[in-house]
Image: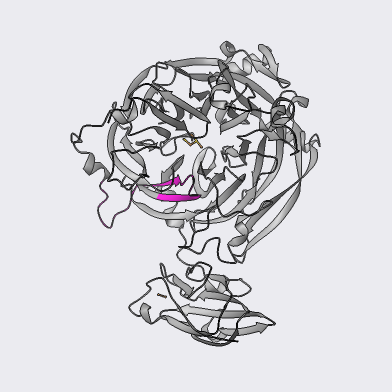
Amino acid sequence: MIRKHKEVAICGGLLLIWLTLAVGCSKKQEVGGFGDAAAKVYVAPGTYDEFYAFMSGGFSGQVAVYGLPSGRLFRVIPVFSQDPEKGYGYSEETKPLLNTTHGFIPWDDAHHPQLSMTDGQTDGRWLFINGNNTPRIARLDLTTFETVETIEIPNSGGNHGSPFLTPNTEYVVASTRFSVPIPQKDVPISSYKENFKGTISYIKVDSASGRMKVAFQILVPGINYDLSRSGKGPSYGWSFFSSYNSEQANTQLEVNASQNDKDFIAAVNWKLAEDLVAQGKGQIWKSPHYHNYMDHADVGQSEVVTDVPVLVAEENPGLIYYIPTPKSPHGCDVDPSGEYIVAGGKLAALIPVHSFTKFQAAVAAKEFDGEFGGIPILKYESVVAGEVKEPGLGPLHTEFDGQGFGYTSMFLSSEIVKWKLGTWEVVDRIPTYYSIGHLMIPGGDTKQPYGKYVVALNKITKDRYLPTGPELTQSAQLIDITGDKMKLLLDFPTIGEPHYAQACPATLIKDKSLRWYPIEENKNPFAIHAEGEARVERDGKTVHVYLSTIRTHFAPDNIEGIKVGDKVYFHVTNLEQDWDVPHGFSVMGSTNSELLILPGQTRTILWEPKQPGVIPFYCTDFCSALHQEMQGWIRVSI
Ligand code: RUQ
Ligand code: CUA
């Protein structure tokens, strides 16, 4: 399939490139010749995968959990999107997680999963992921694989550079992809240069509970802050953000934001920022934002937080430096030692690698090359450690194997290049099918990567799978990196659009997995703890049905006395105390979704009967041989 012109859009950037080249889709791979690949990905029935992989669903607003090396999909976890399969975002308990200052928002664009870390290593406790559209960060609990918290990021236009972590999960960061007037005001769009700003936010994570709180924000010049990594080892205390549109263009960015030879990596001294805020140097801004969390009773709560300390970058010398970086950099990655900062200049013909040691020396010697928005720009030559020459086209993201090599995804030339840290020479390359965005090595952003595989996360899969109409699946490709030459092992489809993914050894998570919620600890105010407590209570036009489920019946299963116009809340408690025995609940004609109630849990759904009659309800999850019998009726009268 040769195409003369191929229009490609880079996610995360706003770039359209007309390529008069037959890259990507033209180089269909030979079939066969995979040697022992099948054996390497075969996980025999009844045995486990070595790694959990958490892949973002992109515009599905979800996270998908896969096993590696098999590529088997285990679970889809709803985060920013309502999910009728699980009743997430439909049940009264989970609806608060989707509250924002813009109202109830049942969707977002989830890009970058990030596993919590202790001392720069994955600890298997939580997974964070950003919502790009209505700026939010979510936290998932890896004992339950459920979303337990969301926080809105105030003073932000597009939360892309997020939620990258500091090495002990002290903070998750969030940076503005789209500069906007901050605080918001009604101004001409053409006044971008005077009025538009960005923010870089640090969200404190409580080390015991995981609870998030916006600790402070830094008001920065109005350019697009794209991706980030934190320093570690010698660079601990700093974080690095790629940026583009240093042209500050407000129209036709594909041309106008691609003028400058170099944009910046912003190096932020977050330890200093912490001190400045502690000294009261932050201005307290009134910036209302929602903080939503599942409380001790597993019931969602929303609170509005208003006060946010804001540091103005240009008023606080030493807080931020700009490192010139070619050209419209996208990825920004720090190697395991913490010495090297690698940028993916998506329009650059090379991969620039900065040195933290040189950066510090350049700052001390004031080797500046002017300033931008009051922030000193360092000299490129003073900071750059080396350049990976002729890597291919469209470098985006880099991960590390812990053996001294970097692996960079090349969007335009659809390949992964492997290069050596220190000598910067390209040592291997492998085609991907097609248009790779992110790539992921288990632990590839940590101090000690687990290595073994690199997973390519591809945007386009033309001719790789059975066709499914105009939209084809997106996909991941598993590549063996244990030898000198990378070897393709497996293709597998993914949900939504996988931007980033992270993986860790299954042993960090699997033995902590919760099997059921202990019923004696169920503090939901509408929970019942035994079938004898099941009942119907009326309070004016509101009816509370305290319903229990256990194999294989509901109690009560004959409900009378409901009237047209009532608001009926079904509070369904699953009394099972056994692994993998959820029950479902649905009512004919419900305008809401079903409920899926995990063992020991209570979930509530609202039903508003519109006409008289006798309405059936039933269990939607095949729970035993008598699942078909698990049903009941509700009589509705005028
Ligand atoms: S971004 S590749 Cu958020 Cu690179 Cu998608
Ligand atoms: Cu309970 Cu089917």
Q: In x, y percent, where is residue 423? A: 42, 15
The correct choice, above or below, for 629 with respect to 62 in the image is below
**What segment carries the magenta color?**
42-65
- The residue lying at 68 percent from left, 35 percent from top is 180
Q: In x, y percent, where is residue 190? A: 69, 28
Using the image as rendered, state which of residue 423 and residue 467 is in the foreground. Answer: 467
Residue 45 is covered by the magenta coloring: yes
Using the image as rendered, state which of residue 584 and residue 211 is in the foreground. Answer: 584
Residue 245 is covered by the magenta coloring: no
The correct choice, above or below, for 420 with respect to 507 in the image is above
Q: In x, y percent, where is residue 475? A: 36, 42
Q: In x, y percent, where is residue 118? A: 54, 42
- The residue lying at 58 percent from left, 62 percent from top is 94
The correct choice, above or below, for 577 with respect to 365 in the image is below
- The residue lying at 38 percent from left, 49 percent from top is 66
Would residue 239 be visible to someone looking at this image?
no
